[in-house]
């Protein structure tokens, strides 16, 4: 064998031996330290405070006309009365064209004797007093309604009744 080949062979053997020596059982084992994982901190919830939106300026409802306000008040009367021209009588008479009419004159309605004897004409003033306290204004009449305490409610209802008096 030639000298360079011989040297290469020896170098290969030494290299192989050192590799095998590193893998042998006799080779000192590298110490591997087990490091405990760092404690995990719980995620803290951070409260995000959102500034409230400024309150919108209150929207004022358009003021109702007295007739429209009276129509709302009339919803309390609907259980017993109708107001349409030619409307039926219910527990109470139809109130169409009531303003300026004499009491106890609606067709096909059986009025109390107290109402018949009253001889009242339903003016705005008489309606106002009657609607305030029906049993006081015409004692012994059949109307069971206790009355409208608020002056504005009576005025608006009378405006609505006037608007429905006449064709």
Image: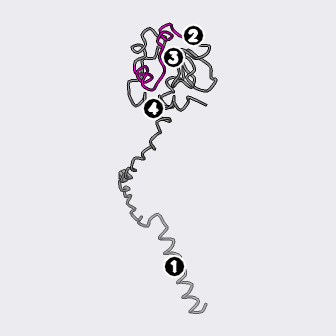
Q: Would you say the magenta stretch is mainly helix, strand or loop?
A: helix
The location of residue 26, given as percent across then percent down, is 44, 65
- Which label sits in the foreground, 3 or 1? 3
Disc ID at residue 15: 1
Rounded to the nearest angstrom, the CA distance separating label 3 from label 1 is 131 Å
Against 49, residue 28 (above or below) is below
Does any portion of residue 48 appear in the rendered image? Answer: no
What's drawn in magenta, residue-wise? 110-132
Q: Tell whether 160 sits left or right of 1.
A: left
Label 2 belongs to which residue?
110
SS state under label 3:
loop
Q: Are marks 3 and 4 in contact (CB under 8 Å)?
A: no
The answer to whether any part of residue 111 appears in the image is: yes
For discs 3 and 4, the disc positioned in front in the rendered view:
3
How far apart in space, not on screen, are marks 2 and 3 (Cα)? 12 Å
Q: Position of residue 3 (x, y in %)?
A: 56, 92
Name the residue at 47% across, 39% down. Answer: 65
**Residues at badges 3 and 1 in contact (C-beta under 8 Å)?**
no
Pick whichever of labels 2 and 3 is earlier in the sequence: 3
Label 1 with label 4: CB-CB less than 8 Å = no
**Quarter holding residue 137:** top left
């Amino acid at each position: 064998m030639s000298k360079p080949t011989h040297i290469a062979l020896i170098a290969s053997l030494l290299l192989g031996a050192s590799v095998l020596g590193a893998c042998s059982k006799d080779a000192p084992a590298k110490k591997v330290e087990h490091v405990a994982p760092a404690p995990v901190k719980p995620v803290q919830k951070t409260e995000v405070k959102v500034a409230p939106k400024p309150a919108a300026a209150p929207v004022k409802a358009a003021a109702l006309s007295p007739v429209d306000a009276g129509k709302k008040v009339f919803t309390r009367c609907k259980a017993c009365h109708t107001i349409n021209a030619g409307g039926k009588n219910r527990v109470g008479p139809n109130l169409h064209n009531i303003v300026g009419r004499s009491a106890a004159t609606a067709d096909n309605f059986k009025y109390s004797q107290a109402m018949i004897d009253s001889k009242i004409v339903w003016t705005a003033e008489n309606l106002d007093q009657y609607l305030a306290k029906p049993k006081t204004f015409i004692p012994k009449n059949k109307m069971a309604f206790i009355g409208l305490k608020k002056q504005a409610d009576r005025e608006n209802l009378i405006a609505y009744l006037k608007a429905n008096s006449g064709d």
